[in-house]
Image (cartoon, helix red, strand yellow):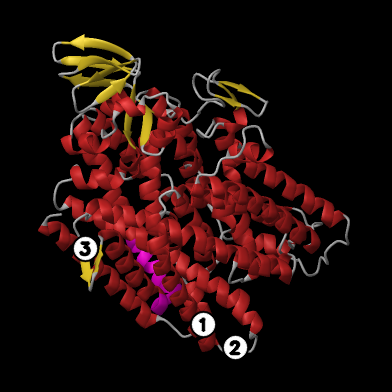
Amino acid sequence: MANIDWLVIAGYFVVLFGLAWWVILKGKDTADDYFLAGRNLGWFVVGASIFASNIGSEHLVGLAGSGCTDGVAMAHYELHAWCLLILAWVFVPFYLRSKVFTMPEFLERRFSPGARWLLSLISLVAYVLTKIAVGIFAGGIVFQTLLPDVHVTVGPYDVNSFWVGSFAVIILTGLYTVLGGMRAVAYTEALQTFILVIGSALVTIFGLRVLGGWSGLREVCGGEMFNLWKPLAPAGWSGTWKPVLDESSKTMAWYFNSNYPWLGMLICAPISGLWYWCTDQYIVQRCLGAPSEKEARRGAIWAAILKLLPVFIFIIPGMICLAVSVSGRNEELTRQFFTAELEKALSRDPQMIAQTKSEVKPIAVGRVTVPGGERREVQGQQVVTNGKVAVVGGEAKQTPDGYVVTGGKVYVNSQSTQAAFPLMVRYVLPPGVRGIVVAGLLAALMSSLAGVFNASSTLFTMDFYSKLRPSASQSELVWTGRMATTAMVVIGLAWIPVIQGARGLYDYLQSVQGYLAPPIFTVFFLGVFWKRLNAKGCLWALAVGFALGVFRLAVDTPVKLFGVTYPEGSFLWIVNNIFFQYFAVLIFAVSVIVMIAASYLSSPPDEAKISGLTYGTITEEQRRESRSTWNAVDVLASAFVLAAIIAAYLYFRG
C-alpha cells in the first residue's frame, strides 16, 4: 500500500462520516425515523441501499473465489435480479399498504401473533449465526491479504491484521448505526454503492488489460468456465437414482453432485432467492422506509438494475485472477497459487487424498502457454511444468518457447482461490487505484454489517420489546433500538476469535440460509396468493419446515466442523451427501403440503381481518390506487432487466 492509497482511504472515511454526521443531525427521536428513516427514502437511495446491503465483503471474497474455481456457475444467484422485480410488482403494494415495521409484523397481520414471534426469533438467530459471522470472516481475509504486516501490541499480546481490521470496522460501523439508525445506514449505503461499483469495475478493467482483453480470458479459462449450465453428474461420471458414490466405477447419485448442476440452479435456487429478496427484513426494510408505493417500487427496480453488475465486477475478477496466475503474467500471483506438491496432490493414497483435499483445488483450464516448460510424469500422469506453473493432463504441443497445453488441469492453493479478489487488488492494481478499490472493499464490509445491525435491532425492538411493553414511548423505543444495535456490535466482536480459528465455518454458514428459507418463502407467497390459508397452516408449515432444516444442519455440522464420517450407505450418510439445493426443495414441498393440509383441516380466516393483505381480498379502490403508482418508465426498466438476464443466460453457455 503506497501513501497515495492511504490518502484515498482516509478521504473515503472523511466523506463517509461527514455524511453520517449530517444525517444523524437531521434525525428525530421517533421509532418511525430511527427504524425506517421517517418513511421518507427516495427511490434512488432505496435501490442503492438494497444493493449495498446485499453486496457484503462475503460477496467479494466468496463470489470472486467461486469465479476462480468454478467459473460463472454462481452467476445464477447474481442473475436473481428478477426476484427484485417480484418484490417491486407483487409484494411492495401489500407491504406499503399494511404500514408495517418488520416482515414478521406482516405475518401477524396476515396470520397470527404466533407466526410473528416464531419468524422474529428464527431471523434474529440466523442473522447472528450467518450474516454477522460470515461478514466478519470475509472481511478478515481481506485485511490479512492486503495488510499482512499490520499488527498492534497490547501488553503481552500481538494482535494481527485479522483482529485489527475486523475490530476497527465493527466499531466504526456500529458507531454511526447506533447513533443514526436506518437513515444513516441508507444514506451511507447509497454512497458506498458507487465506491463499491467503481472500485470493483477497476479490478475487472486492469485485470483484462493484463490478459490482453476478453478473448485472452476466454482462451486461458476455457469454455467450461463460461458455462452456466453444469451437467447433472460431473464430467466423466455416470448418474443414477441409487444412493451411491463409487469412485472406482465413477458412478454417483445425480442428487449427490454438488457442482451446482443446472437443475438445482434453475429450479431450486429461486426458492432461496425469492425468500431473500422478497421477504427478508435485511433487504425489504429499505422499501418499508419509502414514502409511497411508487418510490418503493422504483427503488426495487433500480436495485434490480444494479444487481446485474456483480457477474462482471465480482465473479469475472476471480476468473481473471486464475488466468493471470496460470498464464504466468504476474509472478507474485503465480507464486501464491502454485504452492502444491504435485506428488501429494496427484497421489492415489486415501490418506494423502484426505490430507490435501482442503489444501489443494484442481481446476480445469482452457489453453495455457508454459514458456520454458518440460514434460514430466508424476504419479502416472503427464505434467507440463516450468518450475512455476504446472498443468496436468490435456493435450500438450511443443513450441519454440516451450509448450501449449489445451484441456488440462491445474492444482492450486485453496486459500489463494478464496482470496482471489484481494490478491488482484494487491498485485495487479497500480498505486492510487488500489486505494479506491480498498475503499470499495471497506464499503462492502461496512454496508453489510450496518444493514444486519439495523435489521436485528428493528426486529428485537418492534417485534419483542414493543409487545412486552406496549406503553413504551417513542424515545424509549429508540433507546432500546440503540441498545440492541450495541448488543449486535458486541456479539460481532465476540465472533472474531471463533471465525478466525474455524476456516471451515464459512462454507458451513453459507448453507444455513438454504435450509431456513423454504418455510418462510412458503408462508409469505402462499399467504399472499391464497386467502383460504390460515394461521394454523402458517404455524405448522414454519414449525415442520424449520424442524427439517435443523435436522439437516444437525447431520451436516459434525461432518463440516469436526470431520466426522458416517458409514457409507447409511441413512445419515445419504442425507449428508444430498446437495443442499435439492434438500431445500424437499423442505419446500413438505412445507407447502403441511400448510395447505392444516389450513383446510381448520376454519378459514376472517376475510375482514385480512382485507388488502391477499390478492383475493383487495378492494377496487386499492387496485386503482396501486395502478396509479406506476407508468411506462417502470415497465420499460423492468423489461430491460429481464432482457439483460436472458442475454446473460444465452451468452454463458460455454
Measured Cα–Cα span from mark 3 to mark 2: 45 Å
In the rendered structure, are the residues bearing label 3 and label 1 in contact, judged by CB atoms less than 8 Å apart? Answer: no
Marks 3 and 1, the one that precedes in the sequence: 3
Marks 2 and 1, the one that precedes in the sequence: 2
Question: Disc number at residue 472?
Answer: 2
In the rendered structure, are the residues bearing label 2 and label 1 in contact, judged by CB atoms less than 8 Å apart? Answer: yes
Instruction: Inspect the image, locate mark 2, and give the three-letter code of the amino acid beneath it.
Output: Ala
Marks 3 and 2, the one that precedes in the sequence: 3
- Start-end of magenta stretch: 178-193
Question: Disc number at residue 583?
Answer: none
From the image, which quarter does the N terminus lie in? bottom left
Question: Disc number at residue 151?
Answer: 3
Taking depth in this image into account, of 393 and 536 the one nearest to the observer is: 393
From the image, which quarter does the C terminus lie in? top left
Q: Quadrant of residue 308?
A: top left
**Relative image position of residue 207 (x, y in whole percent):** 23, 38
Q: Residue at x 21, y 10 (%)?
A: 398
